[in-house]
Amino acid sequence: MDASDDADLVRLAGRLARFGGWSVELATGQTYWTAELFALFGYESAGGAPPVDVAIAMFPEDQREIIQAAFNRNVVDGVATDLESVIVDREGRRVRVRILGNPVRDESGQIVRVQGAIYDISEIVAERENRIAAQESLRRTLDYIPDFVFFIDESWRVTFANQATIDAAGLPAERLYSEPIWSLLPELASNALMPVYERAMVDRVSGTARGLFQQFGNWLEVTAHPLESGIAVFGRDVTKDEEWRRKVDEISAFSHEQAAFLDASNEAMIMEDLDNVVTYWNQGAEQIYGWTADEAVGRNIRELVYVDAMVFEGPAAALLRDGRWQGEMVQRTKDGRTVIIECRWQSVRDKNGHPVKLFAVNSDITAQRHQQELQSRAQRMESLGTLAGGIAHDLNNVLTPLLMSVQLMRSHEPTLDHEALLEAMEVSVRSVADMIRQVLSFARGVDGVRAVIDLADVMHELSAVSLQTLPPSIAVTSHFEKIPAIVGDKTQVLQVLMNLVANARDSMEGGGTLTLSVGQQTMTDGDRRATTLEPGVYALITVEDSGAGMSAEVLDRIFEPFFTTKELGRGTGLGLASSLAIAESHGGAISAYSELGVGSRFTVHLPLAGEVPVTTESVEQQSAAPEGSGELVLVVDDEPSIRNLVSMTLQAHGYRVVEASNGRDAIEVFERHADEVALVFTDMMMPIMDGAATVAHFREHRPDVPIIASTGLTASGGFVGTNTSTVRHFLSKPFTTDALLRTVNAAMHEAAESTSMPGDN
């Protein structure tokens, strides 16, 4: 290839690359442009190249000074120049160019010519600007993402880090770029992560690993990719993911490590698919429903535990709609029993939020609801007790004058016919009074009259009253030990035994054996696991029959008020409930055992007697009632009939009487007769000022005056609203003339002895 060929090739390359050459002869100022340079500026080459000053003027105004300075450096300083600028072609288009200038020297070293080239670099600049813009856009994008992105060169220095990395490192960018990353963030080189970096840097193999970043308490997942001169590292916080993974691992280990725990739960834990087919059934579910896991898995929950499947549909729809449902439902067991279930249902969803499984935790709250029902009944019974107490008070106020009237009429030598009528009236009044005490004992736990009782006497009365009514088909056997006495209300204890005998009789319609026994048992702390009785010695009265017996369900409810298995009209359901109330009011208890087809056994526990005070009314006096000797008695009662009859009775037996209808009047009457009043007889339930306030006033101002308190209500051996430490003598309405006179005499006698004893006030 000759020189002309070389010139042609250069010109071809110039046209393709869009660059042209130029030269300036310094001695003559003559300029030379190649045809490619003319074409670059959009001019024809016929007129020749323009002078230097004209050529510089073809550049934009803001570029001319720069071009002139560069040309001067070529000419004056002999320095080659290389700069980027802009030219404006003949059409006014701005073209980005690269300008090269080199001085040319002669043999003597003198600069004689400057020559160079001008390149059209518009496409290169555009590409570069696009690349810079892309890089900037990428940088901004990387700064916006929350994950960590950084580049490391071969010396392990960071060459780029996005904003998340800078923030996490807690270092300014210039510091982060200044040292090897391991000296700044040594935890990034943990045993779990360092091999990944090294494989990417040395072996040029990408890799991923996870490690705990102790500095921030987070788990990081790091991926390293090889670059031409280093590696790119992408990291993300996977703490939540790691927590979820651990949860998934726990669930995965469910069948091995936690199956025993779930099976030990008393709650039913059930997994179902979306068609409600059981896929998991723990032992708690077996215990509640009776179905084994083998029997339950693969079956639809509707047919397993629901009497009416329609009950299930609403909650099931809510579960799928809301993701959870909680509430109570009545379900059934394998043997047909109904149970009350507290349900907590949850849908298990996939990563897209779609339900894939249904998980149910069911708790049997039948016993709890049963207990709540009993408490509700107890509250109703308490209200009934309040009502019964009011009725009893009013009835006792009515019965008191009747009983005293009968006894007053007897004292006036009645005829034989009148005596029979009076006897019948007195028996009726006493019977009504006994019934009132029994109603109170059941409804409010009110104690009756407490006295020392010989159980042999109670069993003798039971034989005389109840056992004689048994049909011949029932044989009676008994075994009575001689034991110490108990303290209680004889009528109430007898009522308990009569109720138990009646129940035994009803359970042996075809005949059988009734066994009665009396013994005693010492109750220790160890025995209290099965009973609420305090440690001590108890009398045991057992009533056992060979009748039909009871199921476990019936046995659990026999002491509930109004619960009965008898036909309508044959039982109220109060017999055993009132019996238990009486036993507990005596400090005892009743236990029951029964089997279907075998019979039943009831055991009554009653504490043996210790040193127990006996009320005035509890001891039958054989001698005639004592008479008064003109002592003045203040009688206080808001019921005129009672007040008048008490006054008449006392006056008929040698006492003088003044009366008051309430506590306030009593104080006024007392002040008028303060030196004469020998005793105060007061009702406890009165308007304006009740008996408790009246007693308190007299105890403060005249503690030496004896007081007898009387009312139709009692509780725990003392009178309602009364401090028994200040009142020693009580009379329960209705009371007899004999009881009234003996109590008045005893109170006065005790007060006289207390006054005469030295050292007493």
Image (tube, rainbow, N blue to C red):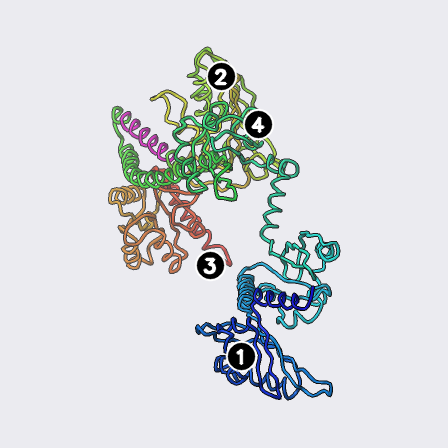
Q: Which mark is residue 547?
A: 2
| Amino acid type, label 2 | Gly
- Eye-nearest disc, 4 or 2: 4
Q: Earlier in the sequence, mark 3 or mark 1?
A: 1
Image: magenta residue range: 420-437
Q: Is residue 170 magenta?
A: no
Q: Give the Cα separation between the discs numbered 1 and 4.
A: 103 Å
Q: Nearer the viewer, mark 3 or mark 1?
A: 1
The image shows residue 29 at horizontal and vertical percentages of 58, 86
Residue count near mark 4 (Cα–Cα under 10 Å), binned few <14, some 14–19, many ≥20: some
Q: CA–CA distance between discs 4 and 3?
A: 81 Å
The type of residue carrying mark 3 is Asn
Image-quadrant location for residue 211: bottom right
Gap between marks 3 and 1 measured at Cα: 149 Å
Q: Secondary structure at mark 4?
A: helix
The residue singled out by tag 4 in the image is 293
Q: Which residue corresponds to mark 3? A: 761
Tag 2 or tag 4, which sits nearer the N-term?
4
Q: Is residue 625 visible?
A: no
Dot 1 and dot 4 residues touching (CB under 8 Å): no
Where, by quadrant of the figure, is residue 185 drawn? Answer: bottom right
Residue indicated by mark 1:
49
Question: Is 74 situated above or below 411?
Answer: below
- Dividing the picture into quadrants, the one containing residue 234 is bottom right
Q: Answer left or right for 308 relative to 76.
A: left
